[in-house]
Each structure stands twice: as C-alpha cells, then as structure tokens.
Image: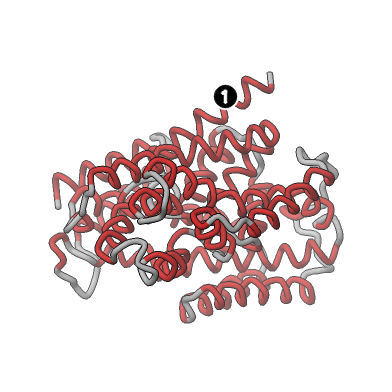
Amino acid sequence: MKLKSIGETFWVFLRLGCFSFGGPVAHLGYFQEAFVTRRRWITQERFADLVALSHFLPGPSSSQVGYAIGVERAGIIGGLAAWIGFTLPSALMMYAVAMTVLYPGELSNAGWLQGLKAGAVAVVALAALQMFVLLAPDVRRKLLVVLTGVLAFVFRDTIAQAWVLLIGAAAGLFALTRQAPMELAPTHRTSPISKRTAVIALALFVASLLVTWTPWALFAQSGSLVFGGGHVVLPLLETRFVLNDLVDENTFLAGYGVAQAIPGPLFTFATFLGATSTLPVSSALGACVATVAIFIPGLLLMSAALPFWDTLKNRAWARGMLSGVNAAVVGLLFAVLIGSIAPALVIRPFGSIVIGPTTIMILLYLAAFALLRRKSIPVPAVIVLCALAGWLLL
C-alpha cells in the first residue's frame, strides 16, 4: 500500500511539475488546490502549518512544502518522490536549453507567456483569498495581515521578509496566546519522521555545508542562504558565477529568463548553471550536482524541523506565535501578488509599458479567476487555456 502511495505521489507531483507556472507563491496555490481541495491528502490547517514552517527555514519554500506533503503521504521516500517528480520536468528543460545554447531574446513578451502570467496571478489571488478567510477570522489578525502586507510591499528584500515574519510571531505571542483558533488547535499526531531521524537530517545538513568540493559547495551554500524562493537566489548565484567568470553574463541572464518561462521550481536555474559553467566537470555531471546540491540543504532542514514543529505548536504560546506567523504569511502573499506577480499584467507584448493593465490581460485574469472559483475545470487546464488565449489574442 505504501509503495502504491509513493508511486501515486510521484505521478501527481510530476504532473504538477509540468504545469506549475508562476514561481514559488503560485506553486503554493497549485498545491492547495491539488492536495487540500481536490484530493484531500492534508487539511487546510496542516497545509497552513507547512507553509508557515517553510517560511521560517532557508531553502526553496514551495519545494519544501511539496516535500513535506509527500512525507505526510508516504514517509521520507514519498517526500523524495514528490521532490523528484516536481523538479524533474523543469530540470530536464533547463538542461536541454543549456545544451542548445538557447537565448530567449523577446520570449518574455510572447503572447502565450502573457497568458500564463494571467493564469498564475489568478491562482495566487484565489489562494491568498482562501487563506485570508481561514487564517484571519478576527479583527486582530486581519489588521496583522494588512500591517505585514504593507511592510513587505514597501520593503521588498529578504531581510524585510524575515522581519515581517518576526513581527507576526511577536504579535501572535503577545496578542493571540489566549486564543485557540480552530485552524491552530492542538494536534496529537505521530510524525512520519522520528526525532532521531530529524537529528540525523540536521547533522547531514551541517555536513552538506562543510563539503569543500567546488561545484557542490557553490550551490549548497547558495541554497542554504535563501529565504522565500527562486528569485531571491539570483544575486547569490550571480556573485558566485558571473563575478568569478564561471559563467558569462549573457548566458546567465538568458538562462534565468528561460527559468521564469517554464513550469516548476525556479531553483532549477542551478541545473542550467551547472551545465554551462566552466567548472571542471562534464555538463551532465555539473547539472546533476547543481540540482541536488541547491535543493538538498532545504529538504534536510525540513526533515529536521517537522517532528519538533508538531510537538512545539501544541503549546499555547507556540500556537499564538504560529497564528501570528500564518497571518504574516498571508500578508506576504498579498504583497508578492501586488508587488511581483500582478505587474506582469501591466506589460504589453513587444515591451511597450502602459500605465494600467491591458483590457485583454484583465479579461484573461478575470476569466481564469472565475473558472478557478467554480472548480469545474482543473487548474492545469485553466493554465493551458490562458496560454492559448494569450497566443491567439496577444
């Protein structure tokens, strides 16, 4: 039965890896629809817990949540199956791009890609709205969502994101500890990962950072210093590769442009760099090492934290902090939606910038949002329809 669950986990995440456009925040929307709403593998409350935990840990947040969902479904092997399935499509695409030395040029202005962006915005908007309703049911938490959202929007960097989460935790500790909201009610469940295994995972995480072999160290250290997802890792990789003449700037920017135009985790940009860099390894080996090295530290940290997280959040003060963090995460979602994803709607094809969104893009977004709310058409189908509409109309 467990083997069947592992296989099912792999195939579901493989399909998601083929259709999950829009970056880490959009991926959480896909996960919520696939595993909370449709398949009911985990509850909305547990999903919110995993999202909050992923924001506390360095590494690729959406991949960490996907790995944790796989662990919940079929143990550590299930978690690895989820990560491989979700990562494989984009890693293969990035390796293929590296081998053909593809320079995307004006790919970002293609009509079908504009349609994909509209679909991604709709997915994120729906996820943010659903989480707002569940995780901010009272006035205090609604105000906390607004406060953290404004701060995250005004101060858009990694340090600001960390401060936003700390503000949420502090607000929860001092203002929400006497409450026991339903979505954060104490749970008495057995973690799929034992505490002994968690300690081993933490030791392996430390060991992974001590490896001095150059290709591994470059990517593992980068993956260990990033909070919030793929876009944040860009300056770290640029410093390590472009400034050290391991990859020329044009190749670096071309690969990053393609990484944003394909589905799956943005961290697979490392696959491209591992294949195209001047590191003393073959292209295939460099791509494999880069892909594993940049993801593994974050997955090990998630494995180390899961069993202790379940125990800790059963305490009233911890539940209060988690309640505040969940509200802050919703604020971050709205800030990212407005500050990073929604601007995709104000860029016309062929690069002409306008003051507001184009009529076609607005209509695409509203249509996608309406279809997602009705739940009559699967999310991947809505995304494909948006791409087709963008190709035909833009």
Horizontal side, residue 109 vs residue 119: left or right: left
The three-letter code of the residue at mark 1 reads: Gly
Q: Secondary structure at mark 1?
A: helix
**Residue visible at 34% across and 52% down in the picture:** 259
Q: 72 or 99, which is in the foreground? A: 99
Task: Please say if 31 is above or below 8.
Answer: below
Give the quarter of the figure containing the N terminus: top right
Q: How many marks?
A: 1
Horizontal side, residue 171 vs residue 222: left or right: right
Residue 132 in view (yes/no) = no
Colour pattern of the rendering: secondary structure
* Badge 1: residue crowd in 10 Å (few <14, some 14–19, many ≥20): some
Tell me where residue 51 sits by quadrant: bottom right
**Residue visible at 47% across and 55% down in the picture:** 24
Residue 324 in view (yes/no) = yes
Horizontal side, residue 69 vs residue 197: left or right: left
**Residue visible at 29% across and 64% down in the picture:** 248
**Residue visible at 30% across and 51% down in the picture:** 261
Q: 180 or 322, which is in the foreground? A: 322
| Whole-percent x, y for residue 380 in the image | 38, 38
| Whole-percent x, y for residue 214 in the image | 51, 57
Residue position marked by numbered label 1 in the rendering: 7
Horizontal side, residue 10 vs residue 102: left or right: right
| Whole-percent x, y for residue 391 in the image | 17, 46
Tell me where residue 159 sits by quadrant: bottom right
